[in-house]
Image: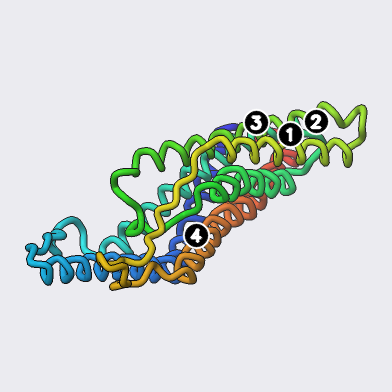
Amino acid sequence: MERQIIWRGLLAGALAGVLAFLFARIFVEPRIALAIDYEDGVAAARDAVETAAGHAGHSHGGDGAGFTRAVQMNIGMGLGVLAFSVAIGALFAVVFAVAYGRVGNISARLLSLYVAGGMLLSLYVVPALKYPASPPALSLDETLRQRTLLYLLMVVVSAALLVAAIYLGRRLVARLGPFIAAVIAAAGYVVAVALVMLVLPGIDETPGPLVDDSGAIIYPGFPADALYEFRLYSLGTQFVVYATIGLSFAVMMSRLLGERLKSPQA
């Protein structure tokens, strides 16, 4: 049974990867291209200032270094989104297998939607409130390790706190009823997450205007609306992943369980 659940999770993840790539290619990629153009513009403006001041301009790498933009935004993004979605599908299947039959009398379809929503909330939405996504071109290479570790820590803590909140709610149902227990568990999760966010350091690398020695602006800061749209569409991509996994997995599992009820030998 577990093997059938896992491969259905992988299949749901693969389907989610295809749809999420199409969404990201249409909506996210133009914002990444804008960030790259901005980075090139800042570098050109800085070189122009240094050249005018009598300093030699710095080299920022040739166009032939690494993969071309066409490869990055098609093959690179496609494989990356697909691999991520399949991994999430596998994790989703494991969580479903552990939770099914242990969290009350909930149907496979409804549990699939609950798991998808909980994973989206704890693995992306909550961590993004503390460490929101930014286009790659706007991040500093010097802080890459720190940003990655802090983000992963926020993801792990958020997921652990959600599991703890669900466990707490289940323990309180018998004494307080389902509604009060759910309210207390949700409030506990929110308070705990807020405390974690206060403790963890913040990271803000969004570039402001480039100014010269006199304080005059020689190149504007990164457009706030472009950054907002990138983060909004990044959230949309994640929503497509988890919604597709949750819905497609719900259909597959309901059929599987229905077949097994009709034919125990299957």
SS at badge 3: helix
| Label whose residue precedes the other's in the sequence (3 or 2) | 3
Q: Which amino acid does label 4 sit on?
A: Ser
Q: Mark 2 points at which residue?
A: 170
Q: Does the image show residue 149?
A: yes
Q: What color scheme is it? A: rainbow
Residue 167 in the figure: left or right of residue 94: right
Which residue is more in the foreground, 97 or 36? Answer: 36
Which residue is more in the foreground, 220 or 69? Answer: 220
Camera-side mark, 1 or 3? 1
Q: Name the residue under label 1.
A: 166
Q: Mark 4 points at which residue?
A: 234
Q: Which picture quadrant has residue 66? A: bottom left
Camera-side mark, 4 or 3? 4
Q: Distance between the residues labelled 4 and 3?
A: 29 Å
Q: Name the residue under label 3.
A: 98
How crowded pointer 4 is (Cα within 10 Å; few <14, some 14-19, many 20+) is rated as many
Q: Distance between the residues labelled 3 and 2?
A: 15 Å
Q: How far apart are marks 4 and 2 (CA)?
A: 33 Å
Q: How far apart are marks 1 and 4 (CA)?
A: 27 Å
| Label whose residue precedes the other's in the sequence (1 or 3) | 3
Q: What residue type is labelled 1?
A: Ile
How crowded pointer 3 is (Cα within 10 Å; few <14, some 14-19, many 20+) is rated as few
Quarter containing the N terminus: top right
Q: What residue type is labelled 3?
A: Val
Q: Which picture quadrant has residue 24? A: bottom left
Q: Which amino acid does label 2 sit on?
A: Arg
Q: How many labels were placed on the picture?
A: 4
How crowded pointer 1 is (Cα within 10 Å; few <14, some 14-19, many 20+) is rated as some
Residue 124 in the figure: left or right of residue 203: right
